């Protein structure tokens, strides 16, 4: 008969395993993330099916560090060298627009949902245009491959799906693609204000149902955040306790389903510092078809930085980069932590980045988003944290996790707002997922525009193949600066 461990040890082990399985949006935060003791009327949160690592609040005191690199290889040690060499030769020899094959039909993983039984390919719209003139889109007719002078400006449109929420819901209802389902149809606005009625930026927020399910968020620069109860609470509770804290002060309010007014929490916190702190991370698909996009980012980042630095708040800037490809490529992801040394960042991180690889259409966006949210040194209280996600393909939903929906929820908990940019060849599934991520985190969806939407050789203009209406258009560089400026302009200053 085998020796058995003591019963107390078994019970303790089971408890530890249950706690480890709790979601970042549905578990008690690690010590230091939320103050103890919790309000007496809050029961212990219930365990959720989906799990991500324990989420920690952003806490880095500064970004005055040398450029550092973390890389996850795309090849495992078990894969034969001959196969790696064959893949590398294919990536180098194939033209940029031919590196990716059409996505293969596959059975969805258990955690995925196919809307109304329709296949993603059936819902995919016409091939989206190239991000920049001269790059031929996937499967584009040969007449679209004509070259356009590189100095031609790149125009882009932007939509705010939170500002026109009914249009976004209509888009979701008519778009039948594979994605990670999170129910955001019911939402409530939370506003955290100080005694003078000014928005309190970067206040920590905890929302807990009577059932115990919970979520975490941080207010944006205007002191606001959208709450979506059905995204984290399968019990569909009728009432929620909402608490906010900052600068050692805490206050609370109640959310009742169906209420029309915003949830308002009064919190006597300090106003923002005179000089804003901005953490700006570029999350970039670095597969073969993204060559022009990466070249444009290299050429424009210094001017973007200069323009942002001249904003009235003269922000303290930090830059980070997470590049990703896919399994089978030279790297799965390569991340460079936040730094305030722009010259070193350009020399050591951005300029060496080259587009290569990519076999099938989806890429390792899930893994890269997880790295961006959880493993970079985001600065703590009072910082504005933005991600610009630049991609022309959806994530792989068949790798078994991590998954983008878990990490977009963790991003909201850490106060990271994501602006997604749809690049060349982005299909309907990619558009759906990019807009999911941007809407939930409070960001916006950006997309390239042309004089003729289906023909990138037609030059800059207002037309697009994406399912959007009532959008504004500008050059891409100015658009990024404008979005950053709008965020920093919301901050309430002292005085």
Image (spheres, rainbow, N blue to C red):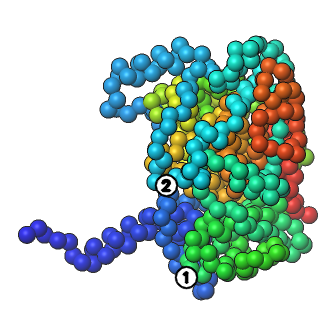
Residue, x 81% and y 14% (percent of image)?
149
Please state the horizontal and vertical placement of residue 362, each as a whole percent of the image.
Answer: 56, 36
Q: Is residue 483 left or right of residue 339?
A: right
Quarter of the image with the C terminus is bottom right
Specify the quadrant of the image occupied by residue 42.
bottom right
In the rendered structure, the answer to whether residue 192 lies left or right of residue 362 reads right
The quadrant where residue 119 appears = top right
Outermost residue, bottom side: 40
Q: Position of residue 450 (x, y in %)?
A: 83, 28
Q: Secondary structure at mark 1?
A: loop
Could you tell me which residue is drawn at 13 percent across and 69 percent down? 3
Q: Are marks 1 and 2 in contact (CB under 8 Å)?
A: no
Residue, disc 1: 43
10 Å neighbourhood of mark 2: few (<14), some, or many (≥20)? Answer: some
Q: How many marks?
A: 2
Q: Quadrant of the N terminus?
A: bottom left
Viewer-proximal residue among 324 and 66: 324
In the picture shown, does residue 332 fall above or below 357?
A: below
| Residue 350 appears anywhere in the view | yes
SS for callout 2? loop
Tell me, for residue 111, which label it has, or none.
2
Q: Which mark is residue 4?
A: none
Residue 304 visible within the image: no
Tell me what residue is drawn at x 61 percent, y 86 percent.
41
Q: Nearer the viewer, residue 127 or 487?
A: 127
Mark 1 to mark 2 CA distance (whole Å): 28 Å
Measured as percent of width and height from the top left, residue 30 is found at 52, 66
Question: Which sits earlier in the primary sequence, circle 1 or circle 2?
Answer: 1
Please rate how many residues cluster around mark 1, counting C-alpha atoms within 10 Å: few if below 14, some from 14 to 19, many from 20.
Answer: some
Percent across and percent down for residue 453 are 81, 30
x 46%, y 34%: residue: 327
Q: Is residue 3 left or right of residue 363?
A: left
């Amino acid at each position: 008969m085998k020796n058995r461990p003591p019963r107390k040890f078994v019970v303790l082990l089971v408890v530890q395993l249950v706690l480890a399985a709790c979601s970042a949006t549905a578990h008690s935060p690690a010590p230091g993330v939320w103050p103890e003791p919790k309000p007496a009327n809050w029961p212990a949160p219930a365990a959720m099916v989906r799990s991500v690592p324990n989420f920690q609040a952003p806490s880095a005191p500064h970004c005055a560090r040398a450029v550092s690199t973390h890389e996850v290889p795309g090849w495992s040690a078990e894969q034969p060298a001959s196969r790696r060499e064959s893949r590398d030769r294919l990536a180098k020899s194939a033209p940029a627009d031919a590196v990716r094959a059409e996505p293969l039909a596959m059975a969805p993983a258990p955690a995925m949902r196919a809307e109304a039984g329709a296949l993603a390919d059936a819902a995919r719209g016409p091939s989206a245009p190239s991000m920049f003139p001269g790059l031929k889109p996937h499967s584009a007719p040969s007449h679209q491959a004509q070259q356009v002078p590189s100095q031609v400006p790149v125009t882009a449109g932007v939509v705010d799906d939170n500002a026109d929420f009914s249009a976004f819901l209509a888009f979701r209802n008519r778009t039948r693609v594979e994605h990670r389902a999170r129910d955001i149809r019911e939402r409530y606005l939370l506003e955290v204000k100080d005694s003078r009625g000014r928005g309190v930026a970067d206040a920590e927020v905890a929302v807990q149902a009577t059932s115990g399910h919970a979520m975490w968020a941080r207010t944006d620069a205007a002191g606001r955040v959208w709450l979506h109860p059905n995204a984290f609470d399968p019990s569909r509770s009728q009432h929620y306790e909402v608490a906010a804290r900052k600068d050692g002060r805490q206050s609370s309010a109640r959310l009742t389903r169906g209420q029309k007014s915003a949830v308002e929490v009064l919190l006597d916190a300090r106003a923002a510092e005179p000089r804003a702190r901005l953490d700006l991370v570029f999350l970039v698909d670095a597969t073969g078809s993204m060559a022009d996009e990466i070249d444009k980012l290299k050429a424009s980042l210094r001017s973007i930085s200069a323009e942002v630095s001249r904003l009235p708040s003269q922000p303290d800037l930090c830059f980070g980069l997470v590049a990703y490809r896919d399994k089978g490529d030279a790297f799965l992801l390569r991340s460079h932590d936040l730094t305030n040394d722009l010259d070193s960042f350009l020399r050591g991180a951005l300029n060496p980045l080259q587009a290569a690889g990519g076999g099938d259409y989806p890429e390792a966006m899930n893994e890269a988003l997880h790295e961006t949210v959880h493993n970079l040194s985001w600065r703590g209280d009072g910082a504005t944290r933005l991600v610009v996600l630049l991609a022309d393909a959806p994530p792989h939903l068949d790798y078994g996790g991590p998954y983008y929906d878990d990490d977009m929820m963790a991003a909201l908990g850490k106060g990271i707002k994501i602006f997604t940019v749809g690049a060349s060849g982005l299909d309907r599934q990619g558009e759906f997922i990019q807009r999911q991520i941007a809407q939930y985190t409070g960001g916006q969806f950006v997309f390239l525009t042309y004089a003729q939407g289906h023909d990138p050789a037609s030059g800059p203009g207002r037309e697009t193949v994406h399912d959007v209406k009532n959008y504004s258009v500008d050059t891409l560089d100015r658009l990024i600066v404008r979005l950053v400026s709008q965020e920093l302009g919301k901050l309430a200053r002292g005085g």
